[in-house]
Image (cartoon, grey):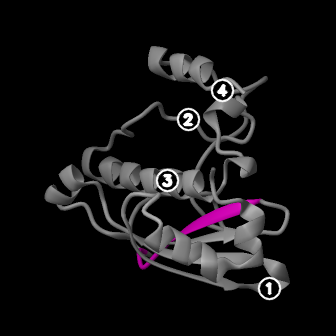
């Protein structure tokens, strides 16, 4: 069972310790947690790339994950003010654009999925950003920015449609 967000909000230090020592999320090298303004939890992580990507020189990534009491989340890359990011929200937040909020629930992280899938989503996103910087190609189906003319953005690849059916909620 995933680590619940309410537990992260109650004790972000314990949540960071869980990520660092429970061996449930790949690549967490450093983790710290603290409570911020209004009961917000802040986790700061250092994430190691997957071994094949590490051999290609992908960097360790530092990120701050902010979890608000209403379970909205934001992820901010740290120590990278001049690196380009393809999927980052506009100012003032400049957090990572992790998913399109109106996509099918099967294709999104939801708060009840818990902490580990959230950290995995953030980690994967940071690796995709580095791949994009190197190749100018997003390494998975690339969701467009902005609102579609109606409904949700269409799934363009067979693989994405299969995953949507596989993980139907």
Q: Earlier in the sequence, mark 3 or mark 2?
A: 3
Residue 18 lies left or right of residue 139; in this view the side is right
Q: Mark 4 vs mark 2: which is more N-terminal?
A: 2
In three-dimensional space, the C-alpha distance between marks 1 and 3, rounded to whole angstroms, equals 25 Å
Which of pointers 2 and 1 indicates the residue nearer the eye?
1
Query: Circle 2 sits on which residue?
Result: 143
Query: Is residue 165 shown above or below 38?
Result: above
Element type where label 3 sits in the image: helix
Name the spot of residue 62 as percent of width and height, x first. Answer: 43, 73
Give yes or no for contact between labels 3 and 2 (Cβ–Cβ under 8 Å).
no
Task: Tell me the CA gap for discs 3 and 4.
Answer: 23 Å
Circle 4: element type = loop
Q: Residue at x 47, y 58 (%)?
A: 24
| Mark drawn on residue 166 | none
Magenta part mainly helix, strand or loop?
strand
Q: Which residue lies under the disc numbered 1?
A: 37
Write the residue at 16% across / 55% down.
Answer: 56
Residue 167 lies within the magenta run? no
Residue at the disc numbered 4:
153
Which of pointers 3 and 4 lies earlier in the amino acid sequence?
Answer: 3
Label 4 vs label 2: CA separation?
A: 7 Å
Q: Say if 9 sits above or below 160 in the image.
A: below
Quadrant of the rendered structure where residue 34 is?
bottom right
Q: CA distance from mark 3 to mark 2?
A: 18 Å
Residue 82 in the image: above or below residue 168: below
């Amino acid at each position: 069972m995933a680590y619940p967000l309410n537990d992260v909000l109650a004790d972000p230090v314990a949540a960071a310790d869980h990520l660092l020592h429970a061996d449930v999320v790949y690549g967490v090298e450093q983790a710290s947690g603290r409570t911020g303004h209004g009961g917000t939890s802040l986790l700061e992580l250092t994430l190691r790339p997957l071994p094949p990507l590490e051999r290609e020189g992908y960097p360790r990534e530092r990120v701050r994950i902010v979890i608000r009491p209403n379970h909205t989340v934001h992820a901010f890359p740290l120590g990278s003010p001049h690196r380009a990011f393809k999927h980052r929200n506009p100012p003032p937040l400049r957090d990572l654009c992790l998913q399109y909020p109106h996509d099918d629930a099967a294709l999104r992280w939801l708060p009840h999925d818990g902490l580990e899938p959230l950290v995995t989503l953030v980690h994967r996103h940071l690796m995709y950003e580095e791949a994009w910087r190197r190749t100018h190609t997003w390494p998975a189906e690339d969701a467009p920015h902005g609102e579609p003319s109606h409904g949700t953005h269409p799934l363009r690849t067979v693989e994405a449609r299969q995953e949507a059916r596989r993980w139907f909620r």
